[in-house]
Image (spheres, grey):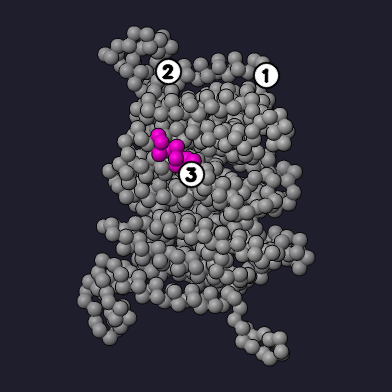
């Protein structure tokens, strides 16, 4: 299973992509998709739908899914916390606030919002760490305090974001959809602006994979093997923030993936980051495509936000994980 | 009140909490006067106090009796209720970060209200508080069922956060189904606003507010025992399971009533007890009263700022509260940490 996993995951992703391009309001057969890709003709309606609507949408979903899932795996590894993920440690909320604040208060161009998201994601993460230290659970080996502080910080940042949204009704309409985690072709320009930031973060995480695997053995052991522990941790966290914040900059905050995908993939690939991270990227992209499909089809003609579907699934998965990691066999 | 000094004489000594309580009351009075006086139609100090002696013109009377007074009362009562619920839940979870909105109780009430608004738009508003209470209680029951047999506070909180995020997604789906005109009103309410304050809302919340001292009296001692730790509480004869259920129900009642009246006051349930605790090391009933009083004052102050923020429509009070509260909260946490370290 372990050897075949990459191949299987890649196949599954290809299948999901095909489905995402075909399914929708009108069914476009694979031959139609091929025709649109090979000989694009603006007068044919099917071609326009594939190229201008479904393809950008699918690309956004895949990029965001991969970036958030990989970040989740890295956060869980470095923080040694099975619940760590971009949406639970304040990164998503911080990045979202920074994008909205940049647009509303400073009138930032969409291009500049990428760096705003990055700064905001980093600050949100630091704030969560800070509150966790303040809340001060000295004997908290399982790192619950961090998740709790992350929730508090996210609530606070979300409140600020809502305040900003209320302050300007004209801009509000533009950002309300984005804020709900909206994978949509409307955000194709954002994809063009920020994809390379997300790619940079993901590449950095992959480069750090070997060192992260050694780090998982324990800080002392890793240090004795010649790893600069503090630097590796800092770089890895930075890369995770970079990847997830740029995903947020593209399509708004998406939950669930960063939390759940690593737990789904780990039993199949093993805990070594060299195999885990690519596995997470593939599986995350797959799941995000599927969630997007559900969002489009479930209540058609009403389209749900992909973020809402993911949050719904994520809440349920979160409950199951709390039961698994913290309730079963836990002390009172 | 009185205790013996070293040489045996009786001296009057106020408990630590009492002084803070008095200071709080003074602040409450000052705030009341200021918040009645400030606003689009300004009233002088004399007019707010002595309007019985000097008759007001129609504008001023309307501003005072129909707008500011109900708003002031509603804000104070809602803040009181939410902060009290937060303080109780924090004892229960043995964690300073517990809060009705973090545990999903508020979201349960919110979903219930929204379902009712969407499915039965013609229903008289008197049913909304009932729906909110049922929604909150349902989530509390679900929470207890999910963590059954595990008293560990942090796990309960995590489960609450999980419930909260699921229910938030449900709210988001429901918003899609609300017709535009209701969804606009809902959006304002969901941000936590006192702009809709009127006398019917005041009378709706008043009974719960009036009943809260009874809850403090009945549960204060039990909560203090819980604060001492589960083994100690059991050794002192506390039925932990029953207390937990009772506290949870009271917290749900208080927070759902406040939620129906003014929308969610996020963060207040964490912030107010934390501030109160930083100001005074009270425990038991005194702690609850102080936390509740602080909550009421915070909302009053935040609303005064929100009304006079300089925009035409003013800001929702919930947002002002969150913005101002966070730095205060961090400060309070730091102070407590500092006190703990210097005392041990």
Instruction: Kindly tell me whether residue A329 is visible in this rendering.
Output: yes
Of the 4 image quadrants, the one containing the N terminus of chain A is top right
Label whose residue precedes the other's in the sequence (2 or 3): 2
Tally of numbered discs: 3
Do dots 3 and 1 share one subunit?
A: yes
Disc assigned to residue A123: 3
Label whose residue precedes the other's in the sequence (2 or 1): 1
Name which residue lies at 46% across and 61% down.
B258
Q: Chain of mark 1?
A: A
Marks 2,3: beta carbons within 8 A: no
- Residue B178: image x %, image y %? 37, 44
Image-based side of B71 in relation to B284, left or right: left
Q: CA distance from mark 2 to mark 3?
A: 40 Å
Q: Secondary structure at mark 3?
A: helix
* Residue placed under numbered mark 2 in the picture: A22
* Residue placed under numbered mark 1 in the picture: A2
- Which residues, given as a range, are shown in magenta? A114-124
In front of the other: B206 or A215: A215
Name which residue lies at 53% across and 75% down.
B21
Q: Secondary structure at mark 2?
A: helix
Above or below, comparing residue A139 to residue B41 in the picture: above
* Residue B125 is one of the magenta-drawn residues: no
Q: Chain of mark 3?
A: A
Label whose residue precedes the other's in the sequence (3 or 1): 1
Q: Chain of mark 2?
A: A
Instruction: Kindly tell me whether residue A292 is visible in this rendering.
Output: no
Dominant secondary structure of the magenta stretch? helix
Above or below, comparing residue A24 to residue A136 in the picture: above
């Amino acid at each position: 299973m372990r050897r075949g996993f990459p191949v299987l995951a890649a196949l599954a992703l290809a299948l999901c992509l095909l489905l995402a391009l075909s399914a929708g309001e009108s069914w476009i057969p694979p031959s139609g998709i091929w025709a649109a890709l090979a000989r694009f003709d603006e007068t044919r309606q099917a071609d326009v739908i594939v190229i201008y609507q479904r393809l950008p949408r699918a690309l956004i979903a895949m990029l965001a899914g991969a970036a958030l899932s990989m970040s989740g795996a890295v956060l869980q590894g470095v923080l040694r916390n099975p619940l760590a993920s971009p949406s639970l440690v304040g990164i998503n909320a911080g990045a979202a606030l920074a994008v909205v604040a940049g647009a509303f208060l400073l009138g930032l161009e969409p291009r500049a919002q990428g760096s705003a998201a990055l700064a905001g994601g980093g600050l949100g993460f630091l704030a969560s760490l800070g509150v966790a230290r303040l809340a001060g659970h000295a004997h908290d080996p399982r790192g619950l305090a961090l998740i709790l502080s992350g929730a508090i910080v996210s609530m606070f940042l979300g409140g600020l974001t809502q305040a900003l949204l209320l302050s300007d009704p004209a801009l509000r309409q533009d950002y309300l959809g984005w804020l709900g985690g909206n994978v949509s072709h409307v955000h194709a320009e954002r994809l063009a602006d920020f994809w390379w930031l997300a790619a940079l973060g993901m590449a950095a995480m992959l480069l750090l994979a070997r060192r992260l695997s050694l780090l998982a053995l324990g800080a002392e052991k890793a240090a004795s093997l010649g790893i600069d522990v503090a630097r590796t941790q800092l770089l890895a966290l930075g890369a995770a923030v970079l990847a997830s914040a740029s995903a947020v900059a593209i399509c708004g905050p998406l939950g669930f993936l960063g939390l759940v995908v690593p737990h789904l993939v780990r039993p199949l690939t093993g805990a070594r980051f060299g195999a885990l991270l690519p596995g997470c990227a593939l599986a995350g992209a797959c799941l995000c495509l599927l969630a997007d499909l559900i969002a489009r089809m479930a209540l058609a003609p009403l389209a749900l936000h992909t973020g809402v579907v993911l949050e719904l699934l994520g809440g349920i998965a979160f409950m199951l994980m709390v039961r698994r990691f913290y309730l079963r066999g836990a002390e009172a | 009140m009185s205790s013996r000094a070293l040489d045996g004489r009786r001296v009057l000594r106020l408990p630590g909490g009492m002084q803070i309580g008095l200071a709080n009351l003074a602040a409450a009075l000052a705030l009341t006067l200021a918040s009645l006086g400030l606003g689009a139609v300004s009233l002088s100090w004399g007019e707010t106090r002595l309007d019985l002696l000097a008759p007001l013109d129609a504008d001023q009377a309307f501003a005072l009796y129909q707008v500011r007074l109900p708003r002031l009362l509603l804000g104070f009562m809602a803040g009181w209720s939410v902060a009290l619920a937060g303080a109780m839940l924090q004892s229960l979870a043995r964690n300073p970060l517990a809060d009705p909105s973090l545990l999903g109780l508020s979201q349960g009430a919110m979903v219930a209200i929204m379902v009712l608004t969407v499915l039965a738009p013609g229903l008289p508003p008197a049913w909304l508080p009932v729906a909110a209470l049922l929604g909150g209680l349902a989530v509390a029951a679900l929470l207890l069922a999910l963590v059954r047999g595990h008293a560990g506070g942090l796990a309960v909180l995590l489960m609450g956060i999980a419930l909260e995020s699921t229910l938030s997604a449900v709210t988001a789906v429901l918003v899609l189904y609300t017709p535009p005109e209701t969804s606009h009103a809902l959006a304002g309410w969901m941000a936590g606003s006192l702009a809709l304050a009127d006398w019917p809302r005041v009378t709706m919340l008043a009974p719960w507010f009036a009943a809260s001292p009874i809850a403090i009296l009945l549960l204060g001692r039990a909560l203090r025992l819980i604060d001492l730790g589960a083994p100690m509480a059991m050794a002192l004869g506390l039925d932990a399971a029953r207390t937990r259920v009772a506290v949870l129900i009271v917290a749900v009642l208080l927070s759902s009533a406040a939620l129906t009246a003014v929308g969610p006051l996020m963060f207040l349930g964490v912030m107010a007890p934390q501030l109160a605790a930083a100001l005074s090391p009270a425990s038991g009933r005194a702690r609850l009263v102080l936390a509740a009083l602080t909550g009421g004052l915070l909302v009053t102050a935040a609303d005064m700022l929100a009304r006079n923020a300089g925009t035409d429509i003013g800001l929702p009070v919930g947002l002002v509260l969150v913005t101002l509260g966070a730095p205060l909260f961090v400060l309070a946490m730091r102070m407590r940490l500092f006190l703990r370290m210097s005392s041990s």
